[in-house]
Image (spheres, rainbow, N blue to C red):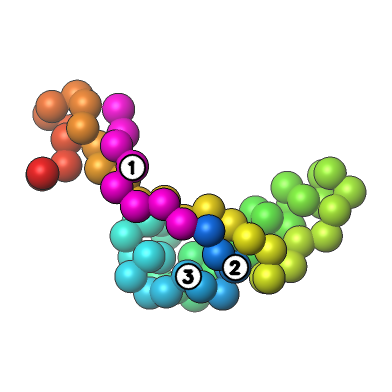
Amino acid sequence: MLRTVELGLGPFTDVDEAFARDEGEDDRSLASWQAEHRKYWTRVRGRRGLEWTEGDEIVFERFRVVWPPELADPA
């Protein structure tokens, strides 16, 4: 189970090194985050016949794992 601790909206260009690192994917760099998420959003929007741009609003979420206890993040 997850608990959201921060939620925001903004353009792709608002992502910073700290957010990319905290998401924890690939090598945790901003460059890697940007490359992989460009591919994802371009593919997903393309399936709907839409074009994705870096100015489109996206959701930024930070969360903590709260259950099960053995996987929970420190409070």
Which range is magenta? 1-8
The answer to whether one can see residue 55 in this image is: yes
Between 74 and 9, the one lying in front of the other is 9
Q: Main secondary structure of the magenta part?
A: strand
- Give the residue furthest to the top: 68
Residue 66 vertical placement versus 50 (above, below): above
- Name the residue tied to disc 3: 15
- Name the residue tied to disc 2: 11
The residue lying at 68 percent from left, 70 percent from top is 55
Circle count = 3
Q: Is residue 75 left or right of residue 12?
A: left
Amino acid type of disc 2? Pro
Marks 1, 3: nearer the viewer: 1
Sequence-wise, the earlier of marks 1 and 2 is 1
- Across and down, in percent, residue 16 comes to 42, 74
The residue lying at 89 percent from left, 49 percent from top is 49
Q: Tell me, for residue 4, which label it has, or none.
A: 1
Amino acid type of disc 1? Thr
Q: Secondary structure at mark 1?
A: strand
Amino acid type of disc 3? Val
Q: Callout 1 environment at 10 Å: few (<14), some (14 to 19), or many (20+)? A: few
Q: Secondary structure at mark 2?
A: strand
Residue 29 among magenta residues: no
